[in-house]
Structure formats: C-alpha cells, structure tokens
Amino acid sequence: MFRELISIFRHSDPLREMGDNFAQMLKITHDTIVKAGDIYFGQEVSSGERTWIYKQDIKVNELERTIRQQLITHLAVAANAAYLPYCLLLMSLVKDVERIGDYAKNLSEVADFHAGPPPEGAIERELREIRAGVEAALAETADVFQKSDTDRAVQLIRTTKDIARRCDQLVEMVARSDFRAGVAAAAVLGARYYKRIGGHALNVLSGVVMPLHKLDYFDEDDLPDNVLETLH
C-alpha cells in the first residue's frame, strides 16, 4: 500500500502537497532530536537554541493539522473515495511524527534538573550509541519514505527494535548502579525517550512494508509476499 501511496503523491497535485508536508515534518523532527540530544548530553546552548526546539515543534504541529485538513477536504469529494485507505495511512503516520517532536522537547528538558550525561563508563557509552542509532535511523526514514525502499525499511526496523531492547537493558543497568538520584533519573529518562523516538520511527517505517491493518506492528513472518521476495 505504501508504494502505491508514494505513486499517488507523485502524480496527484493535492496529495503531492501532503507528501511534501509529511517529508518536511520528518526533516524538522530529525533536526530537533539532534539539537535536543546535544542539550541532553551537556553541550552548552543559548536560551535561543532551547526556544528553537519549541518553535520547531509548533511547526510540526501546524503541519500535522494542515495535512489532516487536506485529507478531510480531499475525501469530501465523492470521486476521491478510492483514496480512503491511503488517507487513513497518512493520518496515522503524521501522528507518529508529531509525537517525535514532543519527545524532542522532553529530552531537552532533562537538563533542567540534571546537566550533562552520566559519569563516564559503560552506561554513558551505551547512551551515546543509542543516541547515534536513533538519530541515524530517523535521518534515513525520510529518504526511505520518499523512495518506498522496502529493503532499507526492514533493516531500519530491525535496528530500532534492537535499540529498544538496549534501552530496556540500560534501565536495568542504571537500577543496579550507585548513581545518585538526579543522575539515575536523567539516564533512565534518556533511555526511555530514545526508545519512544525509535518506536515512533519504527511505526512510520512499518507503513512502508506492512498492510494498513497491521500498521505500527512488525513481525517478519507477517510481511507481504512481495516484500519477502525483495529480502531474499
């Protein structure tokens, strides 16, 4: 279905604009996650840079509302009823991207009660690797979306599922550590926020390879035959 949606974006003016808006949402959220990560890991930033994250989130929210309005307007025309499944797909995906913007704000706010990452060691190194993996996956999501690249989508889904597992393990590591309360809380929140960011990216990527009724769900045993063929 996703490949067909991309084809519609490229050949239908109203839907092409929706596709452009969605791609812009992905780009903005990636940029805000990177900046929020800088703040979380202790990089000194100006008050203007902190404010920039909130302003970008407002842009993402505005784009989400714009896409929703465009979808409703498009479906109000009886002749466009055939596009309903694709519009439902996009309606779901924009919500996932909007949530990524919210987590960018949450991640940057951790520095308000604890500045800087945990002390150097295994937990800090793991957090940095998780950050790098999430940012890389999110950066590629827009390109995968534009190209409807099923091979790369599956690879990135596997990556984000592994990151989620590592985030859970990191929380267990923190629970067994002797970090003081503020440091432990910052580490746990960082792990949980990065897990959720990766999870929402996974949901978007699932739209590339899974049918509409299994959106946000991924099991390789349930991949459509046409996708399985490309992976072997």
Image (cartoon, helix red, strand yellow):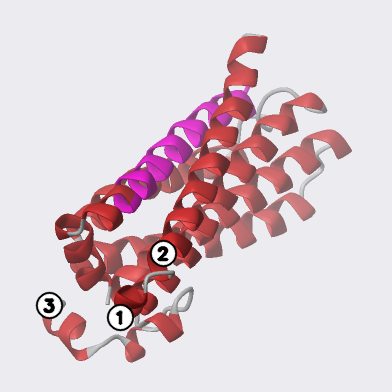
The mark found on residue 157 in the picture is none
User: Is residue 98 shown left or right of residue 9?
Assistant: right
CB contact under 8 Å: marks 2 and 3 = no
Neighbour tally class for label 1: few under 14, some 14-19, many 20 plus, Cα within 10 Å:
few
Q: Earlier in the sequence, mark 3 or mark 1?
A: 1
Q: Is 96 covered by the magenta stretch?
A: no
Q: Circle 2 is placed at which residue position?
A: 90
Q: Earlier in the sequence, mark 2 or mark 3?
A: 2
- Say if 59 sits above or below 91 in the image: above
Q: Residue furthest right?
A: 181
Query: Residue sitting at 16 percent across and 56 percent down?
Result: 10
User: Is residue 40 shown left or right of residue 91?
Assistant: right
- Say if 203 sits above or below 137 in the image: below
Q: CA distance from mark 3 to mark 1?
A: 28 Å
The mark found on residue 82 in the picture is 1
Visible in this render: residue 44?
no
Q: CA distance from mark 2 to mark 3?
A: 24 Å
Amino acid, disc 1 = Ala
